[in-house]
Amino acid sequence: MTVVTQKPKDKTWYDEGNTPIPYNRINKVERLHERSSAKILKEALNINERLNNFKAMIRQLSQEAYDAYMDSKDVKKKSKGNYTWFNFNRSIKIEVSVNEPIIFDDLTIAAAKDKFDEFLDKNVTTTNQFVKEIVTGAFETERSGNLDTKQVMNLTRYVNKVNDHLFTEAVKLIQESIRRPKTKTYFRVWLLDADGKYANIDLNLSSI
């Protein structure tokens, strides 16, 4: 969207409905808001561009640092996990965090839940009630309304211990339901302070 800042020299201003308003009907507060918001927007766009350029730079340099280290150790197969690297005297620390979120396909995870329920109805007694607690707990939604991914995935660990065809089928449905949105990579820069502790250089506007 292109924003055109309206100025005092313009005899007519236009509101959100594109209705022409004579300048002499624009009050002092509205003029201030127009001027100040334009100044903030200009600076915000400038900072946003610089942050994008910075992210591209730190991504490239971190990848070069990672590749150089792995090559020095003669590592051929390189993982895509998290890593941390430093300058020579370790006064600068760079953290690279790779986030690979997991979400579940709604219909398939619902089918898995039904299969678990079938398993519980046929197998759970008073002596192994804990199994029901584990399964039902895994499918309790969080405040956000979403399933706790970690708890659901933990159920797959019990497939060999339970050794039941219904449980196995339910676990297979969990695995089939897994969807992986686009991986996100986060970068953090730390500086060693006078107390020997790393202080994060905060690039989050709301935290400053």
Image: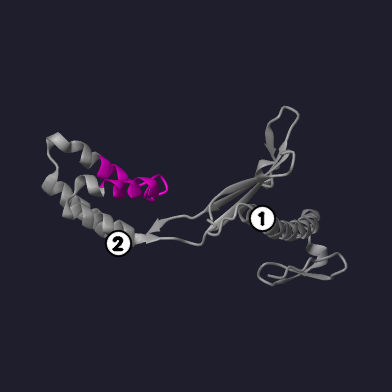
> Pointer 2: what residue?
108
Q: Is residue 186 left or right of residue 39?
A: left
Of 52 and 95, nearer the camera is 95
Q: Quadrant of residue 34?
A: bottom right
Q: Residue 88, image x and y in percent?
A: 74, 42
Q: Position of residue 105 (x, y in %)?
A: 35, 61
User: Which residue in the structure is indicated by mark 1?
Assistant: 68
| Visual colour scheme | one colour
Magenta residues? 134-158
Closer to the camera in the image, 36 or 48: 48
Who's the residue at 40% across and 44% down the image? 143
Secondary element type, mark 1 = helix
Q: Residues within 10 Å of mark 1 (few under 14, many from 20)?
A: few
In the rendered structure, which amino acid carries the disc numbered 2?
A: Thr
**144 drawn magenta:** yes
Mark 2 closeness class: few <14, some 14–19, many ≥20 residues within 10 Å: some
Q: Earlier in the sequence, mark 1 or mark 2?
A: 1
The mark lying in front, picked from 1 and 2, is 1
Q: Nearer the viewer, residue 201 or 136?
A: 201
Residue at point 71% right, 29% down? 196
User: Quick check: can you spot residue 93?
Assistant: yes
